[in-house]
Image: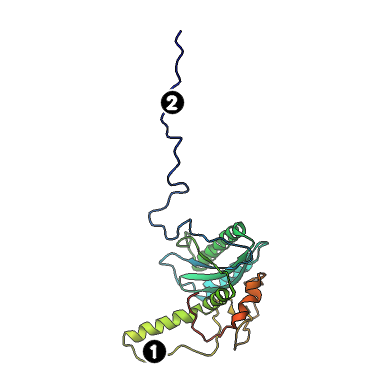
Amino acid sequence: MRRAKQQILPLGLDRRHENPGRPRGKHPRIAHASRDAFPANHPCHVTLRVRPGLPTLRDPDVVREIEAAFRRGNQRKQFRLVHYSIQDDHAHLIVEANGAFALGRGMKSLASLFAFAVNRAIGRTGRVLADRYHLRVLKCPRQVRNAIAYVLLNARKHAEQRIRRLRSTGMRNVPALRNDGAIDSASSGRWFAGWLAAPVRSDGSLPAVAPPRTWLLRTGWRIHGLIDPNAIPMRA
């Protein structure tokens, strides 16, 4: 009897998939391969952006809800929220984590708390965040100092930009930016002890941030000087 010869089906199993991983959406804003390495001794600057059309996040009721959420999630065993500021359509955070896995889990929890707080404050349901959070690892004292100033003084930066835009249209009597050392009430600045010329201004509420543990956020950044509350921050 003739023995049947086994045939080989051309299934293409010997070829590598050209584009492994989760398919990209139609309009991805932040690539999934763009994350930097995250050593445990380096803090990072995170930006959360909300979807267009939502009310301003700087409304006192919204700020109050977000800060209450931050108090619940600011300090996990391996993740800490150390500084933040809340702007009209985004929030800046400086966080620490004990490695990339702890960072991912901590940010997933904090972003969820943030989104629920916004919805609760404005009385809606549905998606809040516009996209994945943007992350930048801070690797040296100067980067950390610049990031702290950028985050805590971000409202001053936006106010200065609005003043310049109004004056460029020819509008007169646009008031100058205040230089009285006022601390942004929609930030963690009132619990920050590194101001150059202003005392810590707390309203008596419990901090919505955790004490830093990394050398860079505790003392390293101070090599380059304390932070002037009347400065206009450079981009972090």
Label 2 residue SS: loop
- Distance, label 1 to label 2, CA atoms, is 79 Å
Using a 10 Å C-alpha cutoff, classify the residue at mark 2 as few (fewer than 14 neighbours), some (14 to 19) or many (20 or more).
few
Residue at point 61% right, 77% down?
221
Closer mark to the observer between disc 1 and disc 2: 2
Q: Residue 200 sits in which quadrant?
A: bottom right
Residue 220 place in picture, x, y as percent: 63, 76
Picture layout, residue 109 above or below residue 223: above
The residue type indicated by label 2 comes to Ile
Residue at point 65% right, 80% down?
204
Residue 8 — which label? 2
User: How many numbered tags mark residues here?
Assistant: 2
The residue type indicated by label 1 comes to Val
Which residue has dot 1 on it? Answer: 174
Horizontal relation, residue 166 to residue 208: left or right: left
Residue 196 place in picture, x, y as percent: 60, 86
- Say if mark 1 contacts mark 2, CB within 8 Å: no
Label 1 residue SS: loop
- Would residue 55 be seen by someone viewing this image from the given angle? yes
